[in-house]
Image (cartoon, rainbow, N blue to C red):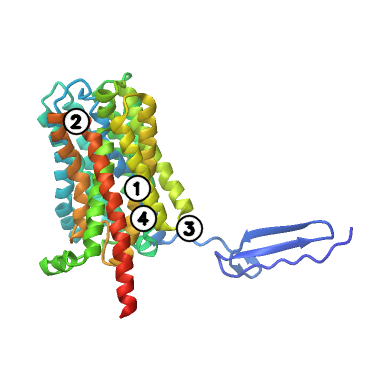
Amino acid sequence: MDTKPVTLVAAPVSGIRAGCVFQNRKIAYNVTVLARPIQDGTPAAAEPETPQASSARNGLSVFFLSGMLMSFPGAILPAWGYHLDYDFLEVAQYFLALALGLLASVRVGASLFQRREVRFVVVAGSVLACIAFLWLAWSAPPVRYGWRVAGILCIGLSAGMLNSAAFQSISSVYQHDRASTVNLAGMLFGLGCFVTALLISSAFYVYTVPSTLFLVSLVPGFAAGLYARARFGKPVQHANKGPKEIWAEVRSPGAVLFTLLLFFQSGNEWSVAGWLAIFLTHRIGVSPDDALLMLAVYWAALLVGRVTAQAVMSHIGHGKLLFGSALAALLGCLILVATNNRFGAWTGLLLVGGGFASIYPLVVEKVGHRFPDYHPGFYNGLLSFGFAGGLLMPCLLSILAHWWGAWVVMAGPFLGTCLVVLLILLIWIEAKLTAGAAARI
């Protein structure tokens, strides 16, 4: 068979893809190879991973551990027997302790970053989490709940330290692509949440509560050993804003709208995550292990939704995706409030998880474009107030549920999602008006 000469072109620069074409009369092959540097006719070895890439990879992995810690209160409540009684004021204290621990981590983390490297903070947070889980294993019921509140406080403190350190390590890639970076971090965070719910669900009738918590404590303990030898980036200095800077943000309608949107959206996500298992047992009569499994599915829906959102972001307008996600979450919350059977519960939690998945990354992207100084790893300025919703709303709903019943814990996210949809419309209108005013100038 007649053939044409074969041409092979190799690029002399690593990381550039070169095309090799083999042709004859009947068939053509298009082969893409990754070229490597050529020295004296011999391909050189691939370049080692850069410190920035290694730091970003290690920082992203911390979000998995952070997810396990942050989702722990919502997963452990049935194991502590709150699916049998209605003492929701104790539950409120657990969520309040988690919030106080996260707030305390702001000062603790800032102090440590001034004197220590990021790796030290990650290892310290992991060790503290391991100790907190062992403390909770000792203080499991029938020990008085006040001892468990102290353990949850330490869980919040360690989670806040890990969050700050993780955002410090991914600062370089975050500045390059905000939405994708936050989405990837959210995937790993959601995976950690999913693992916690699945682990406690699987061990519910197999191991005692102290034994389960001892197994959970092995994860941060093992992580501390790994992170002690890992590479992380240098701490990023970020000055706290004074009253003048915060007042300047208050005068910006866009900043205020984004702050309110973050407040309610964070509160919606964590209210559902913290209360879903207890809500299903009290409202529908689901067994606690099945309720925890459904909680794991909720986290899986968030995870799959973020993966899907990452894939379609380049093909669908971000505004349309944001608005559609909010409407799906709104419908899911409405179904959960109204349902009294498993089918409605499954439908509602899948819609809520899938709808919530892409809202936060898209909001962070818009915040980053409009306000370049905004960084999700620092709690300062007006926009940082938005994250308080995730800390305060589960606690507030616990108090309301004590007086009005468990149905309130899903009515809250429903109303919050309505406000999110309204705020998205207001943000869109404000952006149009701002663009029109700039064009006239």
Residues at circles 4 and 1 in contact by the CB criterion of under 8 Å: no
Residue 24, located in which quarter of the rendered image?
Answer: bottom right
Q: What residue is shown with label 2?
A: 136
Q: Is residue 147 above or below residue 56?
A: above
Q: Is residue 154 left or right of residue 265?
A: left
Looking at the image, tell me whether mark 2 or mark 1 is earlier in sequence order. 2
Looking at the rendered image, the disc whose residue lies closer to the viewer, 2 or 1, is 1
Residue at 18% x, 32% y: name it: 135
Looking at the image, tell me whether mark 4 or mark 1 is earlier in sequence order. 1
Q: What residue is shown with label 1?
A: 326
In the image, what residue type sits under mark 4?
Answer: Leu
Q: CA distance from mark 4 to mark 1?
A: 11 Å
Residues at circles 2 and 4 in contact by the CB criterion of under 8 Å: no
Looking at the image, tell me whether mark 3 or mark 2 is earlier in sequence order. 2
Of helix, strand and loop, which one carries label 2? helix
Q: Is residue 441 above or below residue 430?
A: below
251 vs 62, nearest the viewer: 251
- Indicate which disc residue 156 carries: none
Q: Quadrant of the N terminus?
A: bottom right
In the image, what residue type sits under mark 2?
Answer: Leu
Q: x, y percentage for residue 285? A: 29, 20
332 vs 83, nearest the viewer: 332
Q: x, y percentage for residue 208? A: 26, 20
In the image, what residue type sits under mark 3?
Answer: Ser
Of helix, strand and loop, which one carries label 1? helix
113 vs 200, nearest the viewer: 200
Residues at circles 3 and 4 in contact by the CB criterion of under 8 Å: no
Residues at circles 3 and 2 in contact by the CB criterion of under 8 Å: no
Residues at circles 2 and 1 in contact by the CB criterion of under 8 Å: no
